Amino acid sequence: MPDREAIQRLKNGDIGGLETLIARYQLKAVRAAYFIVQDEQTAEDIVQDTYLKIYERIRNFDESRPFEPYLLRSVVNTALNVARQGERFAPVSNNGGLDGVENLLSQAASVESQVEMGEIKRQILAAIASLPARQRAVVVQRYYLDMSEHEMAAALDAAPGTVKWLLNAARGRLRALLGKERGGK
């Protein structure tokens, strides 16, 4: 069922519309929140809270607009708010909760390449985890959610120049951190 139909069903009081949207976007939303808060349970709570808020306010949703960017923008903003509140988050584990990366590792031809890929993944996740929350958010929005700088600025309620600065600072910090991890300068 298309998103518009699911939203219309939800507006008509049919909870099946929400079930359809959850089934379609749950995994992507939890992953986006996880990258920001670095804790799987907190990420799941953020997404659940976001869906609940959407359910409560669905009558105000403009059906002519796409649902996915609206949902993911809400998830990212909620995750940023949680991170700003100083919640304590679990350190990044070696598996990072990323099924896609795990699938790539399982397909690796040799044990050596699996070990190398696991180490690279650990380094990347650790570097992302060390970024401030707003920088983690722009990295997730740009590289995971494929949002443009304009979309990111709207989602973060920030000037485009601020978004460019945050993204540039995050990239620089990641380069420095990953360079140190790999034995660079």
Image: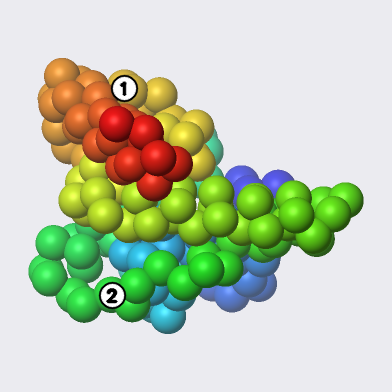
Q: Report which quarter residue 169 is drawn in.
A: top left
The reply, left or right, for residue 178 in relation to residue 29 is: left
Q: Mark 1, residues whose alpha carbon is within 10 Å: few (<14), some, or many (≥20)?
A: some
Most extreme residue toward the right, as rendered? 109
Q: Residues within 10 Å of mark 2 (few under 14, many from 20)?
A: some
* Residue plotted at (17% across, 25% down): 165
Could you tell me which residue is drawn at 35 percent across and 72 percent down?
91
Residue appearing at x 32%, y 57% in the figure: 129
Q: Where is residue 168 drawn, in percent x and y?
A: 25, 25
Residue 39 in the image: x percent, y percent?
A: 38, 73
Q: Which mark is residue 89?
A: 2
Residue under pointer 1:
150
94 to 25, vertically: above or below: below
Q: Quadrant of residue 172?
A: top left
- Please report whichever mark, 2 or 1, sits nearer to the chain's N-terminal start: 2
Q: Quadrant of the C terminus?
A: top left
Q: For numbered disc 1, what is the local secondary structure?
A: helix
Q: Residue at x 13, y 62 (%)?
A: 84
Q: Is residue 127 above or below residue 15?
A: above
- Looking at the rendered structure, the kind of residue marked 2 is Phe
| Foreground label between 2 and 1 | 2
Q: Amino acid at mark 1?
A: His
